[in-house]
Amino acid sequence: EEGGDLFETDAHDWTALMWAVSEARADMVETLLGLWRDAGEASDDEQTDMAKGWLDANDKINGWTALHLAAIGGSRDHFTCARLLVRARAKLDVLDACGDDPASCVEARGGREAAYAWHRLLGKGDDEASFPRDEEA
């Protein structure tokens, strides 16, 4: 929605960033992160305060952050979103309602190969060859 509030959430506390990540829309994630950076630099104290917690906000059902959603998604495009979030300094150790961090979600969903790719992402962030293949439909 044009002119919408970047920090607005839905009934489950999902932000626009969470929705963009869940749909693996790296282009939208990049745009939202740019707006977030701008809001964090704003002179308005209230907006700056809201920006501080936005990147690592948890939803109220599963406790997921945008990084959890990227981890659960598991596709190459989700990993691209994860890379953008990591570069924006998303916290890697936020736990969801089950006590899992995003890396644990990757391993539970995708196994050892996906977990290896995730750890390479966290370490380097640029090695696209290490991303797991998308699941075939």
Image (cartoon, rainbow, N blue to C red):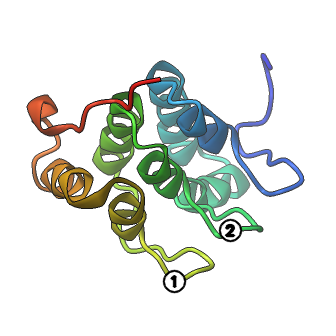
Please indicate whether residue 87 sits to the left or right of residue 53 in the image: left
Q: Position of residue 18 (x, y in %)?
A: 62, 44
Q: Position of residue 61 (x, y in %)?
A: 76, 67
Q: Where is residue 137 in the image (x, y as percent from the top left)?
A: 47, 23
Q: Position of residue 115 (x, y in %)?
A: 24, 58
* In the image, residue 120 above or below residue 52: above
- The mark that comes first in sequence, 2 or 1, is 2
Residue at point 42%, 52% (across, down): 71
Three-letter amino acid code of the residue under disc 2: Asn
Mark 1 packing: few (<14 Cα in 10 Å), some, or many (20+)? few
Q: Mark 2 points at which residue?
A: 62
Please indicate whether residue 130 sits to the left or right of residue 1 in the image: left
Mark 2 packing: few (<14 Cα in 10 Å), some, or many (20+)? some
Please indicate whether residue 90 sits to the left or right of residue 17 in the image: left
Q: Which residue lies most toward the bottom here?
A: 99
* In the image, residue 98 above or below residue 46: below
Q: Mark 1 points at which residue?
A: 99
Secondary element type, mark 2 = loop
Residue at point 89%, 53% (across, down): 11
Q: Which residue lies most toward the front here?
A: 137
Residue at point 23%, 38% (across, down): 132
* Towards the viewer: 116 or 61: 116
Three-letter amino acid code of the residue under disc 1: Gly
Secondary element type, mark 1 = loop
Please count the marks in the image.
Answer: 2
* Towards the viewer: 113 or 53: 113
Query: How far separated are the C-alphas under marks 2 and 1?
Result: 10 Å
Determine the image quadrant of residue 116: bottom left
